[in-house]
Image (cartoon, grey):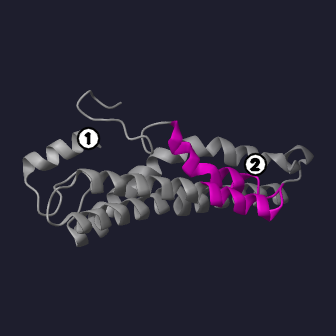
Amino acid sequence: MKNDQEQIDLYRDTYVRYLGYANEVGEAFRSLVPKSIVWSSYVLSSGYVLADTIHKGAKVYQEDATPQKIKNVLLSTSDTLLWQAFASVIVPGFTINRICAAVQFAQRKSIRVVWKTPWISTLIGLVSIPFIIHPIDHAVEGAMDVTYRKWTGYHPKGLLCGSNVSTRKKFIVMI
């Protein structure tokens, strides 16, 4: 839970975050629906990723008064796009796909008719989604901190390029 000093991020701290997991729902249903439905879920999830990316870039553009405004916008949008792509689409999509594939493998090996119901892998995939969200978010955050953010010197909660501490504190409160 965020304290009163931190503003809630619509795209990461509310139920809107689940839109980024639309493709996981599609992956859970992959064995039961046409592939076009699965790919449509990826379109919805990618729309969420782009919305957050544009939102974060627009915030920096509106609030940054430093000479390096364009650089800060590019760093903010690229950071958001990478984070969201990995935390919302790539890693969770792969994870749910593999969970469902493992269940289907076990179903094929099972001799019990009850376990051969096609809905079982879908239900297990759907039930898995809430359990993978936060661990994946934290893992991607950590991976970004030691790779891309270290390489660029940019962190979404750190100082903007060309700014001082007081400017960035004011900026963080507004985001």
Horizontal side of residue 12 vs 131, given as left or right: left
Could you say where residue 38 lies in the image, as x and y percent from the top left? Answer: 73, 59
Query: What main secondary structure does the magenta stretch of the protein show?
Result: helix
Closer to us: 129 or 51: 51
Range of residues picked out in magenta: 15-44
At label 1, counting other C-alpha atoms closer than 10 Å, the crowd grade (few under 14, some 14-19, many 20 or more) is few
Marks 2/1 in contact by CB < 8 Å: the verdict is no
Q: Nearer the viewer, residue 25 or 70?
A: 70
The answer to whether one can see residue 147 in this image is no
- Residue 102's spot in the image, x, y percent? 70, 59
- Residue 37, quarter of the rendered image: bottom right
Q: Judge whether residue 40 is colored magenta.
A: yes
Q: Residue at x 31, y 67 (%)?
A: 74
Of all residues, the one furthest to the bottom in this rendering is: 151
**Figure check: 90 above or below 28:** below
Q: Position of residue 107 (x, y in %)?
A: 81, 55
Residue that lies at the very extreme toward the right in this rendered image: 113
- What number is the disc on residue 174? 1
Residue 148 vertical position relative to residue 164 in the rendered view, above or below: below
In this figure, which residue is indicated by the disc labeled 2? 122
Image position of 175 with respect to 90: above or below: above
Residue 92 image offset from top left, x and y in percent: 56, 56
Image quadrant assignment for residue 1:
top left
- As rendered, which of 169 and 114 lies closer to the eye? 169
Residue at 46% x, 58% y is: 84
Q: Amino acid at mark 2?
A: Thr
Question: Is tag 2's residue or tag 1's residue first in the polypeptide sequence?
Answer: 2
Q: Does the stretch in magenta take in 35?
A: yes
Look at the numbered disc 1 and give the secondary structure of its residue. helix
Q: Label 1 amino acid?
A: Met
